[in-house]
Image (spheres, rainbow, N blue to C red):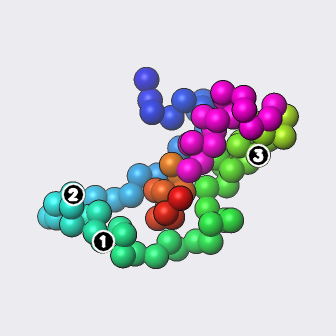
Amino acid sequence: MSWWPFGGGAKPALPPAAPGGSAAAAAAGDAAAKPKKKICCACPDTKRLRDECIATHGEEEPYCKALIEAHLACLRLEGFNV
C-alpha cells in the first residue's frame, strides 16, 4: 500500500536527493533554502480536499484529520516549517 491513502489523484512530489551528500547535509540545505511558492499557493490538491472535507463533515472527522495531516506533510515537502 502506498503512503498516500487518498486515491489515485496527484501525489506530492518528493524533493530530489542531494547528489553525493549525506542525509544530514541534505537536511541542512533544506533548512536554509526558502520555499519557492507562497504558502497559500502550495499544495492546491491537498488544500482543496482538506477544505471540502472540513466544510462538509467538520474538522473532527477522522478522514478530515488525515487530510489535514496530508496537507501539512505536503507543505513540509515544499519547504515550509509548519
Q: Which residue is mark 3?
A: 51
Q: Which residues are magenta?
A: 57-72
Residue 34 visible in the snapshot: yes
Residue at image coords 21%, 66%: 25
- Give the quarter of the figure containing the N terminus: top left
**Rendering quarter of residue 22:** bottom left
Main secondary-structure element of the magenta-colored stretch: helix
Instruction: Give the secondary structure at mark 1.
Output: helix
First in sequence: mark 3 vs mark 2: 2
Q: Which residue is mark 1?
A: 29
Q: Does 16 appear above or below 12? A: below
- Tell me residue 32's x, y (percent): 36, 76
Residue at image coords 21%, 57%: 23
Local crowd at mark 1 within 10 Å, few (<14), some, or many (≥20)? Answer: few
63 or 49: nearer the viewer: 63
**Which amino acid lies under the numbered mark 2 shown in the image of this protein?**
Ala
